Image: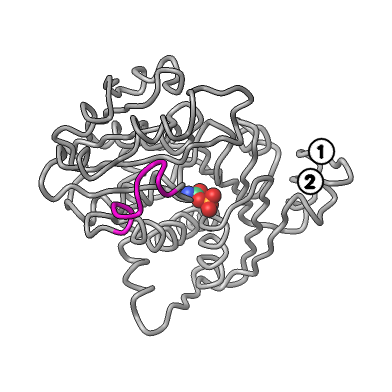
Amino acid sequence: MTLRSKDLLGMKELNPEEIDEILRTAEMMKMVLSSGNKKTSHLQGKSVVTLFYENSTRTRLSFEMASKFMGAASANITTSGSSVNKGESLIDTARTIDVMATDILIMRHNQSGAPHFIAPHLKASVVNAGDGMNEHPTQALLDMFTMKESFHKLEGLNVAICGDIYHSRVARSNAIGLRKMGANVRVAGPATMIPPGMEKYGCTLAKTVREAVEGADVVMGLRLQLERQNKSLFPSVSEYARFYSISPEILSHANPGAIVMHPGPCNHGVEMPTVIYDSPQSVINEQVKNGVAVRMAVLYLLMARRNQE
Ligand code: CP
């Protein structure tokens, strides 16, 4: 099965069969990664460029490693050190990369909708590596992959997403993707940090973190994104931590065997204490590890579609 679109812009644009195909392909890629030789030739003779207008450690590095493991020629552009700093527009930057025979352009941008804007103008496939407060589809895919590894299913799982929902593209992509795969999603956070219309994704709004976590199989914390706030949405960080942190007491209300997730980077002591971050229930390092396999799967499937054309 191939993907319907040349681009991966969001979980909104993927159907359940495509999500399933990406997760299955990622299983294969994880086997490759755990073998002695991580190299494949799936992207040999192809080129992959990452264009990041925002900082990143996990997403950028995992895409770069995925490209290299699969044999692609890969390059990286960030705003500092590129002509973006001379005022070059997004579309001119993207077209410049496109005409250098780029096959896949992976972009992170601070504006929601930026990858959707450039994609129709390019021959290259565009992958959304996070656009403003909109979506971060490959994070949701690696989160779903990690949940599936723990529970061997997504359908019927109870997932609690806690914290700064408003600014979180991870929460949005997970809510959309998980609902498409039949999981139940509850969200909790300060009232000022729950975006209007979250229910339209099929989520339930919980009044407290404890209510969200009650009977959950998966408890996901989110980074408090202070850099996206131009006015304070809660009294203080310590008060936020007191009411919205995933503490051992809060976690005791989840199902036995529940896992703890966080997309990273984590503000220790705010979203959760270090004792939870490092606990046996935490699969946070597994999420990071799975990011490489899932991104290999995305690159593989997009290239397969391009080769068919
Ligand atoms: N989860 C995530 O997107 O992390 P980075 O910002 O480090 O890429």
Expressed as whole percent of the image width and height from the top left, the position of residue 132 reads: 59, 34
Instruction: Quote the CA–CA distance across marks 2 and 1.
Output: 6 Å
With 55 as the anchor, is 158 left or right in this view? left
Q: Which mark is residue 100?
A: none
Q: Nearer the viewer, residue 286 or 213?
A: 213
With 152 as the anchor, is 48 left or right in this view? right
Expressed as whole percent of the image width and height from the top left, the position of residue 87 reads: 87, 40
Which residue is under mark 2?
Answer: 93
Q: Nearer the viewer, residue 48 or 258?
A: 258
Q: Residue furthest right?
A: 86
SS type, badge 2? helix
Q: Residue at x 37, y 84 (%)?
A: 36
Q: Residue at x 34, y 18 (%)?
A: 199
Q: Residue at x 38, y 51 (%)?
A: 142
Which secondary structure dominates the residues rendered in magenta? loop
Residue 183 is a magenta residue: no
Residue segment shown in magenta: 268-278
Q: Amino acid at mark 1?
A: Ser
Determine crowd level at label 2: few under 14, some 14-19, many 20+ residues with C-alpha closer than 10 A.
Answer: some
Expressed as whole percent of the image width and height from the top left, the position of residue 62 reads: 51, 62
Snapshot quadrant of residue 49: bottom right
Q: Using the rendered image of the protein, determine whether residue 149 is visible from the camera's viewpoint.
A: yes
Determine crowd level at label 1: few under 14, some 14-19, many 20+ residues with C-alpha closer than 10 A.
Answer: few
Q: Is residue 12 above or below residue 35?
A: above
SS type, badge 1? loop
Q: Using the rendered image of the protein, determine whether residue 309 is visible from the camera's viewpoint.
A: no
Q: Tell whether label 1 touches label 2 (CB within 8 Å).
A: yes
Q: Amino acid at mark 2?
A: Thr
Q: Residue at x 52, y 31 (%)?
A: 134
Label 1, ligand 1: CB separation under 8 Å = no
Which residue is under mark 1?
Answer: 89
Expressed as whole percent of the image width and height from the top left, the position of residue 258 reads: 18, 47
